Structures are given as C-alpha cells and as structure tokens.
Amino acid sequence: MLGKLFKHDMIATWKVAVSIDLALIVLGILTGFVLHALPHVEESFGMGLMFVSFIGLFYIGVIAANIVTIIYMVMRYYRNLYTAEGYLTFTLPVKTDMIIHSKVLTGALWMFLSYLCTFISLGFAGLGFLSSIDVPKEEILDAVREVFSFLGVIDPGFMALFAMIALVTPFAAVLCMYFCVSIGQLWQGHKVLGTVLCVIGLYIFNQFASQIVFFASGFWHLMAQSASDIDASFPSIYKHMLLNITILTVIQSIVYYVVCIFISRKKVNLD
Amino acid sequence: MSSLLQVSSLTKKFGTVTALNNLNFELESGHITGLLGPNGSGKTTLIKIICGLLQPTAGSVTVEGNPVGVESKKVISYLPDTTYLGKSSSVEEVIKYFCDFYDDFDANRAYDMLGKLNINPRSRLRTLSKGTKEKVQLILVMSRRADLYILDEPIAGVDPAARDYILNTIISNYDENASILISTHLISDVENILDEVIFLKQGNIVRHCAVDDIRTNEGMSVDSLFREVFKC
C-alpha cells in the first residue's frame, strides 16, 4: 500500500514541484548569461544596477524556491491529514504509519531535488561568472583546491559525511515541518496558528542547540588559536562540527517522526 | 444473523465532557439502521470512532470481529458530513484513487451514476457546486460493494428533490447482505427506509429497536416517537 500512497502523492505534487525546480534552473542559466555578458558591455550606472539586481534576484530566487517547495509539501500534509480531506485519508484501508511514510518520502524526494537544482543553478551562475573574468583557469582551480584543502573536503571521511548530510537534510527538513503541523493540530480551532508558533519555537530552540554543538565541537578552541594553528586544526574541527550537527539532526528527526506517528495514530481530531 | 458491528462499553470523553457514555449495541448484516438524535447527541463522534477517526476513551468496537483498523476499513464505506475531496483533482482522478485503494470499488457503477446526473468525469472538483460535490461523494461511497455503509447526515442541507435522489441512490445501490448505518435528524425523510433505529441522547442510547416494533407497540411513527423522546 505504501507504493500506492507514494504514487498518488507523487502524481498530486509533481507539477508544482517540477515547475519550481525548472524555474530555479532557468534562473541560474539566465544569471550565468548575464554574468558572462556584462563585462563585455560598456560600463554605465544602468548596467551596474542591472548586474546588482540580477544577483539579488538570483539570491532571492534560490531561497524562495526552497522555501516554496517545503511550504507546498507542508500545506499538502496539513490539508491531506488535518482538514476535511483527512476524512478520506484516515479511512483508507492502510496503516496510519504508511500514510506518514508516504508523505515523508514524497516531501524528502522533492526537497532533495530542490537542493540539487539549487546546486545546478549555482553551477550555471558560477560558470557564467568564471567565463567572464580574465583570470587563467589554472589559477581558479588552484584557488578552489586551496579552499577545499583548508576545509578538509578532499578526504574520504568528509565525502562520506557530505553524502550523509545530503541524505539526512531533506528528511530532516520535511519531518521538522510535519512535526510542527502535527503539534499545531492539537490546538483545536487554531491549527494554523499552533503550527506557526511551533515553527518559531523550534527555530529558536534549534539556534541554541546548534550553537551549543558548535562550541562543544571545539569552536572555542579554534578561536583561541593563532592563525597558523587554525590552518592546521580547522579541517578536523570543521569535520567534527558537521558530524555533531548531523548527529543532532538525526536525533531530532527521529523525535519528529515518532511524534508525527503518535499524533496521527492517537490524537487526530478532525473538525 | 451474524453480528457485523459490535460496540462494547464505548465511552468517549473530551476533557470533562462525556460525548459517549458506555454504549453497547450490535448491528446485524442486511439491516438499515437509523442513528437518530438531536445535534450534539454524539452521533458523529460514534461514527468517527467506528471509522477510526477518533480513539475511544474506553471500550471497543469490532467490525466483522476485527478491531478498528485496516481490516475494518476495507469493509466500511463512509460518507462524512463534510466535503472531503481535494479541490485540484478531477472526478475521474478521484475514481482512479478509489479504484486503487478499494478492491470492492465498482468504477462502472460510478461512471453510470455520474452519467445519469450529467456530471462530466473530467470536471475539476473546484468547478463543481457544493451540492454536486456531495453527489459525487455519495456516488463514490455507494459504488463500493462494502459490507457496512456509514452515512453521516447524507441529506442535511440539501433540497427535497436532492434528498429523494440521495435516498434512491442509497436504496438502489447497496447489496441486501450489506448494512447501512445512517445518521440524521431529518427523521421523516428516512423513516420509510429504516429497519431499526438507535436513539442517542447526550451520549447515551435511550432506544434501540425495530421500526416495526415502534409502529406496532407504540402506535406511532418514528418521527413522532423521536419528537416525544427529544421534546425540549
């Protein structure tokens, strides 16, 4: 039954989600063209303004695309489960857990694709910029290698960690928002307000939690070091921080998942 | 006759308010039962528990011997008192959805009923009037070969002509071995199709008997008895 639920969730969401992703890629290509062409155009205030506007538009577009995707997923979750549509959803001959699993899988898949399209879009914009500047390609590659080396990215352990983050982040994002919707619906008559308050509360909590993890991972130690020592110790501390943040995210996601399942099984009260 | 639905010591409380108070009753196959009571008597709460939309505070419900869950949902066809279909779907898409999830769904029957009502299956639900959407929902529910149909206020808020259509659809589309539990406070409209009634008052069953017994023993219609029992 999970397959059927997933199929129908995908059918219901693909048009909107794919449109957002395509718009994101088109925006990246356009930005790449502008960044590529602009240095060849005669300098003027108008061209400068256009350049800045395009960069701003690209920046806003990338953020908006990711936000719109997750809001769309959350809206569907809320509508399908906790509004009148829940009368159909919860009377389907399937286990309640399957309904949640399908929503999580659908949401995480679209979020993953949204992040992927963000990288592709950034890639197009970056290529446009790099092709427009008069710096030898070797120098650019050297600079990239230097940054990667400083961050400790060129390391199998870091690559594995990055793959884990790429896998965990979309699930964490949708589970976090589904958790807020589930908590919000407990407040009969003010379900949306309850959700919004939960999002705000969780955001504040997460800020504190991530700060604690940063400092516990050796951030203080890093601040107290000299510049040359930082160069040497930064990769391991950076990796340590990312690992701890990922572990925190996984733990939080498990809590979100358990709460979502519990509420959908035991605390549903449709209007 | 076998017991299709068994409700035992069922209690539901919302905070300090008792919506259902220690209900006990059984429904057998092949009967149309009216779940009758004024607003706030607990009809919808009882139906929601039977359909798995609410958890009881105490007691149990079994359908064909199974507790409320996947197996019970397979044999219950439920019409809620609200429009539950997503606005962005077309009627055709919703039919496919029902076909996928309910093995007992008869798509031909659904298309046949839609045709009789001149409802275009390709219409988006957002373009249909409230009344037409309710008819689509009824068609979907009655197109299943379910063992138990639970209809919550199917004729509330519709004009008399539509009421006749709805009641005819119910009567002509259910299998005689199946049962119908129909909740309403419009007694006179449904009285003629009922085999038995359950009167629900403030979460308690105050009467559960055959309609013929009411007519024979009390010498009055169900509607008259209802007015007497629930006199304000």
Image: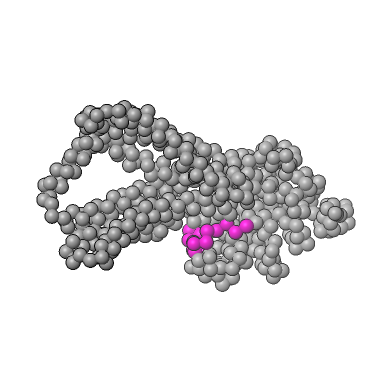
Q: Nearer the viewer, residue B212 or A164?
A: A164
The magenta-colored residue range is B82-96
Quadrant location of residue A156? top left
Q: Nearer the viewer, residue A44 or B188?
A: A44
**Residue B135 on the magenta span:** no
Q: Does A76 appear above or below B155?
A: above
Q: In the rendering, at what x and y percent does residue A13 appear?
A: 42, 56
Please report the residue visible at 66 percent of the width from the left and 40 percent of the height from the top: B56
Which color scheme does this rendered protein use? one colour
Q: Nearer the viewer, residue A99 or A22?
A: A22
Q: Quadrant of the N terminus of chain B?
A: top right
Q: In the rendering, at what x and y percent does residue A246 appear?
A: 36, 35
Residue A257 placement, left or right of A126: right
Q: Does B186 appear above or below A100?
A: below
Main structural element of the magenta stretch: helix, strand or loop? loop
Q: In the rendering, at what x and y percent does residue A74 appear?
A: 47, 50
Quadrant location of residue A131? bottom left
Residue farthest to the bottom?
B118
Quadrant location of residue A174? top left
Q: Nearer the viewer, residue A109 or B20?
A: A109
Residue A104 placement, left or right of A45: right
Q: In the rendering, at what x and y percent does residue A251 appear?
A: 43, 33
Please report the residue visible at 62 percent of the width from the left and 47 percent of the height from the top: A188
Please report the residue visible at 84 percent of the width from the left and 52 percent of the height from the top: B229
Residue B153 in view here: yes
Q: Quadrant of the C terminus of chain B?
A: bottom right
Please report the residue visible at 51 percent of the width from the left and 41 percent of the height from the top: A201
| Number of disc labels | 0
Residue A94 in view here: no
